[in-house]
Image (cartoon, grey):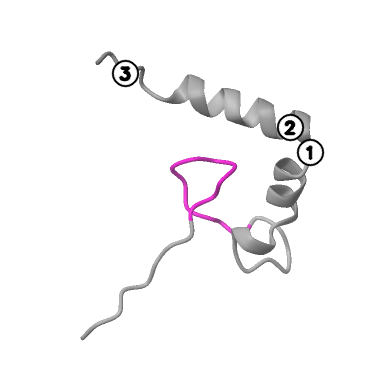
Amino acid sequence: MRKSLVEAKCPIRPGEKCSLCQMGVSGPHDCGLVYLVMHDDELRELYAEQRRAAQPSRTD
């Protein structure tokens, strides 16, 4: 059985893979930028608003 490699996705740039843009980082789990955005209430809310705006609207 082959194990496939999973590419980590960047939570700050939705749809893009983690490019390890910070030195010493091995993925989103230890990225300083992700930590800062997700632990700051205002930045996290701004990020959530931008993600909602980028999603296609659902008309059910």
The residue furthest top is 59
Q: Are marks 1 and 2 in contact (CB under 8 Å)?
A: yes
Residue under label 1, please give it.
40
Residue at 72 percent across and 41 percent down: it is: 37
Magenta region, residue range: 9-20
Q: Position of residue 17 (x, y in %)?
A: 47, 53
Q: CA distance from mark 1 to mark 3?
A: 29 Å
Disc 3 element: loop
Is disc 1 surrounded by few (<14), some (14 to 19) or many (20+) residues within 10 Å? few
Q: Position of residue 1 (x, y in %)?
A: 20, 86
Magenta region includes residue 29? no
Q: Which amino acid, by three-letter code, is at mark 1? A: Asp
Q: Position of residue 18 (x, y in %)?
A: 54, 55
Which label sits in the foreground, 3 or 2? 3
Mark earlier in primary sequence (1, 3): 1
Residue under label 2, please give it.
43
Q: 28 or 39, which is in the foreground? A: 39
Q: Is residue 31 left or right of residue 5?
A: right
Question: Looking at the rendering, which quadrant does residue 56 occupy?
Answer: top left
Residue at 56 percent across and 46 percent down: it is: 11
Q: Is residue 38 left or right of residue 5?
A: right
Is disc 3 surrounded by few (<14), some (14 to 19) or many (20+) residues within 10 Å? few
Residue under label 3, please give it.
58
